Image: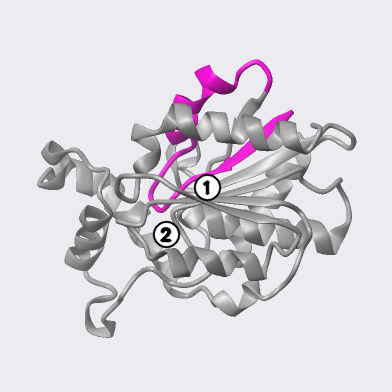
Amino acid sequence: MRLFCFPFIGGSGSFFSGLEPYLWPDIELVKLEYAGHMARRHEAFYRNFDELVFDMYDQMKAGAGQEEPYALLGYSMGAIAAAEVTKLILARKEVTLPAHVFLASHGPCPILVVQEHDADTDEAVKRWTVRFGGLPEKLVNSAAFWRVYLPIYRADYELMMGYDFGRLEYETRIPATVLFSPADIPRKNVEKWRRVFVGGCDILEFEGGHFFLREHEREAADTIKERLTEHDI
């Protein structure tokens, strides 16, 4: 069983490493990386969300095999990427369907409130990133950190700002589980995933902020294993 993991804005697949001790050896994490990030830092950034989706689909397809069961896990922007890849899987019919889709810290609707006049400023990108949390205090005012990561965050924010959430108006009976913190986003936003995953969509609350997973890796891993076991994987 493989679990393909889609990172958040500015993030890396290493974010999911904390789940591994609780999932291995029953579930193997496949930590996907976006172009321009970490090990792929020398590659050009995506020009639009379609390029990200097709790239993630190709990576997933290459690692999924034809018969082996697999599932998807997307975090924040990665939740949108995972939902889009699911849509592409349904359309192309080249691989078996995922056994389950796990979506965290994002609903099928925008979470950024962007003022048009500051959408392209460095300070706006920094402000959004700090707002979501997850940055150690020592990095918030680090010129060296921002010199490396500001272009990455900017590229990802631009992808999300240009994304049309109307693209998620499809239906599938693939079961889904949504993980979120009500201190981060309203429950009504994540409830909208039920319109997509009509075959069953559980909504689970966790305490914490946008990156609640860091404090709840054991609980999240237990949820993943339980859901996959429920569906006879």
The location of residue 224, given as percent across then percent down, is 60, 35
Picture mark count: 2
Q: Quadrant of residue 59?
A: top right
Note whether 228 is above or below 141 in the view shown.
Answer: above
Which of the 4 image quadrants contains residue 228?
top right
Image check: 124 left or right of 44? left
Tell me if 139 is positioned left or right of 176 in this view. left
Which element type, helix, strand or loop, lies under badge 2? helix
Quarter of the image that includes the N terminus: top right
Residue at 74% from the left image edge and 36% from the top image edge: 230
Q: Say if residue 47 shows up in the picture.
A: no
The reply to whether discs 1 and 2 touch (Cβ–Cβ < 8 Å) is: yes
State the separation of the CA atoms marked 1 and 2.
Answer: 10 Å
Q: Is residue 210 left or right of residue 96?
A: left
The answer to if 73 sits in the magenta stretch is no
Identify the residue at image location x=43%, y=35%. Answer: 15
Q: Secondary structure at mark 1?
A: loop
Q: Which residue, given by chain and number where applicable, does mark 1 sit on?
A: 34
Q: Residues within 10 Å of mark 1 (few under 14, many from 20)?
A: many
Quadrant holding the C terminus: top right
Q: Which of pointers 1 and 2 lies earlier in the amino acid sequence?
A: 1
Q: Which residues are magenta?
A: 1-26
- Residue 232 in the figure: left or right of residue 203: right
Q: Is residue 137 visible?
A: yes
The picture places residue 134, in percent across and down from the top left corner, at 27, 43
| Residue at 53%, 30% in the rendered image | 221
**Residue type at the position of mark 2:** Asp
Coordinates of residue 35 in the picture (x, y in percent)? 52, 48
| Residue drawn at 64 percent across, 50 percent down | 56
Q: Which residue is mark 2?
A: 156
